Amino acid sequence: MKVKQSKILPNEEILKYYFYFIQERMNIFWRKMNGDSNLTDDPILKKYKFTNVYRACDRTSQYLIRDVIYKDISSYSAEDVLLRILIFKIFNKIETWDYLCKVLPEPITIKNFNPHFISQILSKRQKNFPIFNNAYMMTGSHQLYNYLSSKHEKWLTMVKKEFIDSSTFSKILETSSLEELFNLLREKSFLGDFLAYQYSIDFNYSPFINFSENSFVKAGIGAIRGIKKCFKNNGNNFEDAIMYVQDNFGDLQKIYGYTDFKPISGHYPTLIDLQNCFCETDKYLREKRPELVVDNVRIKQKYTPQNKPLYLFFPPKWNVRDKICIQRNFQG
C-alpha cells in the first residue's frame, strides 16, 4: 500500500512532534511495565491523559479482547461473539459490561437479546452511575428511533432491528476485506465513519475475522486535526497521510531523530495505531504549540494513575511472543 510522496507535503517543523509522541509515549508504556516511578519528564504527557501508541494496549481494548471476546469463547457462536463485542463497544465502559454480566439472568446472545429488558436494567444503573464512556460521542438521535425515550434503548433497539433481525452478523462473517466490513457497518443508523471503522477493528480482534489492519484505514475527526497540523495543503487526503507515515516510518524516525522506539515484539504499529497517534499528537500540540489552532484548543482529560493491575493479552492470531509484555501486571 505505497503512496506517492509527491501527493504528501509534510510540515517538517510539526511532524517531528508526531514521532516524538510515539517514541515517548511508548517509552512511558515500557517504564510502566518495568515498575518505574518516574514515567516521563515531559510535563504535558505527565499532566494529561494520552492513549497508548498501540490501540490494543489501552485498558478498555485489553478488557474487550481478554474478557469479552476470548473469555469462555467456546460457549458462544461466532455471531454471539460479534454481538457481545458490539454491545460492549456501544457503551465502551468496563463497569457497564461488568454490571450487565452480574445482573442479567444469562449471558448476552443472539437468541436471548432483549433491548427493552436490558434498557430497563441500565436505566436503573444510570440513576447513580454513568453507563457510557465519554471517549466517543454517542448521540443516538436517529429519527427512526425517536419514539424511544433513552439513548441507550435507541442504540440497543438499533442493534436488534439492524443487526440481528437483518442477519448482519452473518453478513459480517462473509465479508472479504476490512473495507467491505467498514462499508457494511457504515450503512447502520448510528454508525458514521469513525465508529464504523473503530468497530471494524474491534470485530477483527476476534478469531472469526482475520483481515490485516494495514489493508484499510479511515481517519477520524481527531486524527484529521492532527494531520492538518502535521502536513501542508493536504486537502482531503487524510488516509494517504497516514499511509505515507507507515510507508516511510523508519526513514522519518531517522530524519527527526527519534529512533529509540521499542515496539511490541513482532508487531509494529499498524494503520489504526498510526491513525490514533495523529489524534493524540493533535492533543499534545494544543499545549506544546497552541498557536496551531484547528478546532479544539484545550485538552479535556487529566492523567489519573489506575490502581488496578492490567494483564496484557493480545489476539492469539497475532502471535505476539514478547515475554515482558504478556501477562505482566502494572499500574496503568
Image: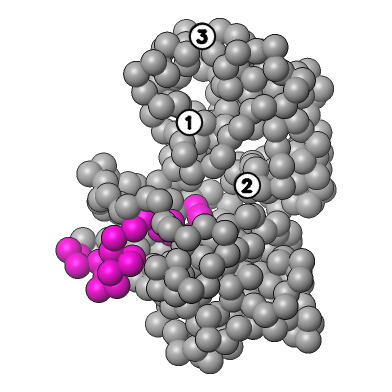
Instruction: Say what secondary structure mark 3 lies in.
Output: helix
Q: Earlier in the sequence, mark 3 or mark 2?
A: 3
Residue 42: x %, y % from top left:
29, 72
Which mark is nearer the camera, 3 or 2?
A: 3
In this image, 215 relative to 329: left or right? Answer: right
- Tell me which residue sits at (40%, 68%) in the image: 287
Residue 122: x %, y % from top left:
47, 16
- Give the extent of the magenta segment: 36-56
Query: If the image is split into quadrants, where does the N terminus sit?
Result: bottom right
* Contact check, label 1 and label 2, Cβ < 8 Å: no
Main structural element of the magenta stretch: helix, strand or loop? loop
Residue that carries the numbered disc 2 in the rendered image: 198
Crowd tier of the residue under label 1, counting other residues whose Cα lies within 10 Å: few below 14, some 14–19, many 20 or above:
some
Image quarter for residue 90? top right
Residue that carries the numbered disc 3 in the rendered image: 120
Q: Is 157 or 231 nearer to us in this picture?
A: 231
